[in-house]
Image: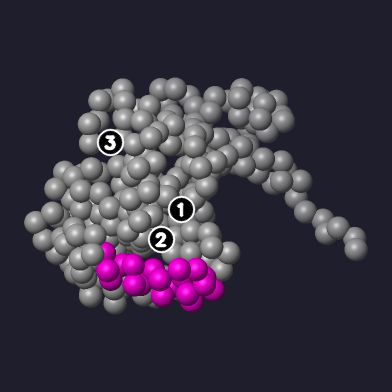
Amino acid sequence: MKERAGIQSVEVGFSLLDVLAHAAGPLMLRDLAAAAGMSAAKAHRYLVSFQRLALVIQDAASTRYDLGPAALKLGLASLSRLDAVKLARERVVPLMERIGHTLALAVWGNHGPTIVHWEESPSAMTILRLGDVMPLLSSATGLCFSAYLSREAIAPLLKEELSRAQKLNRRDLPASMAEVDRLLQEVRRHGIGRVIDSLLPGVVGFCAPVFDSDGHIALGIVSLGPVSSFDAAWDGAVASALKQAAAQLSSDLGYSGG
C-alpha cells in the first residue's frame, strides 16, 4: 500500500516534543537538539513556534526547555479517554457522595502517578489539581503505584525521592530501601495505600488500585480528607468503600485475580 503523504516538518518538530516527554526534566537547547538529531539552530526555530502554541515553555533563569501547559492538556485528554478512566469517572460522583470526601483518579505518567480527574467534596478544601504528579513515598497514590508496579518502572524515581528524603532528614519517610520495601508490603497486605500527615499536615489519604485484564495496575482511586473527620482505619468506611469500588471496576475491566 502506498504511504500517504504527510507534512515532514511536523514529524521532524515532533521529535523535540518526544525527547522532552521522555526526559527526566527540563533540557538545555544543545542537549535537546542533540537528542532529537538536529542542529541547535534548527531546533530553536521549532521551539519558538512551540512556545507560541504553549506546547513548550522556557525557564527565563536557566534557559532550559520543558513541556508546556498545552502539552499537558493534550496528554490529560488522551489519558482521560482510556477505557479504565472513562469507566471510573462515571462512578466517582456516587462514590464521593457515599464517603463524603474528595475523590480523584490517578494513572502512571512519564514523571510518576498523575491526577487525571478529581471530584471535590463540597465541604473540602482544595488539595489536588488536575495534572499533579504525586510523590512515591509521601502520598497514598505514590505508595499504591509503587506497590503494584514493577521495581524497574519505579526504581529511578524511588531512588531520587529516597535520596531527597535523607538529605532533608524527613523522619516521617523511609530512610532506606529496606524500609521502603516494608512499607510497600504493608500496602499489598491491606490492598490499599495510606498516608497520615505525610503529604500534608492534618490530611489523610487512601489510594486503591484498579487492575486491567492483564493484572497490571491501570489507575488508582484516591480519597483525601482532614484527620478530624476522615476515617483513617485500614478497615474503616472510607478504605472499604474505595477497595470495593476498585475491585468492581477491576472486574469490569476483565481482571480475575484475587
Image point (30%, 42%), residue name:
138
Q: Quadrant of the N terminus?
A: bottom right
Residue 5 place in picture, x, y as percent: 82, 56
Q: Is residue 92 magenta?
A: no
- As measured in the structure, the alpha-carbon distance from the residue carrying label 2 to the one carrying label 1 is 8 Å
Q: Amino acid at mark 3?
A: Leu
Q: Is residue 219 left or right of residue 22?
A: left
Q: Amino acid at mark 2?
A: Pro
Q: Quadrant of the C terminus?
A: bottom left
Q: Is residue 124 left or right of residue 249?
A: left
Dots 2, 1 in contact, CB < 8 A? yes
Q: Is residue 125 above or below residue 46?
A: below
Q: Is residue 86 above or below residue 170?
A: below
Q: Which residue is mark 2?
A: 209
- The mark nearer the N terminus, 2 or 1, is 1
Q: Which residue is mark 3?
A: 173
Q: Is residue 244 magenta?
A: yes
Residue 237 place in picture, x, y as percent: 20, 69
Q: State whether residue 95 appears in this view.
A: yes
The part of the chain drawn in magenta is 239-258
Q: Which residue is mark 1?
A: 148
**What's the magenta bit mostly, secondary-structure-wise?**
helix
Image point (43%, 47%), residue name:
146
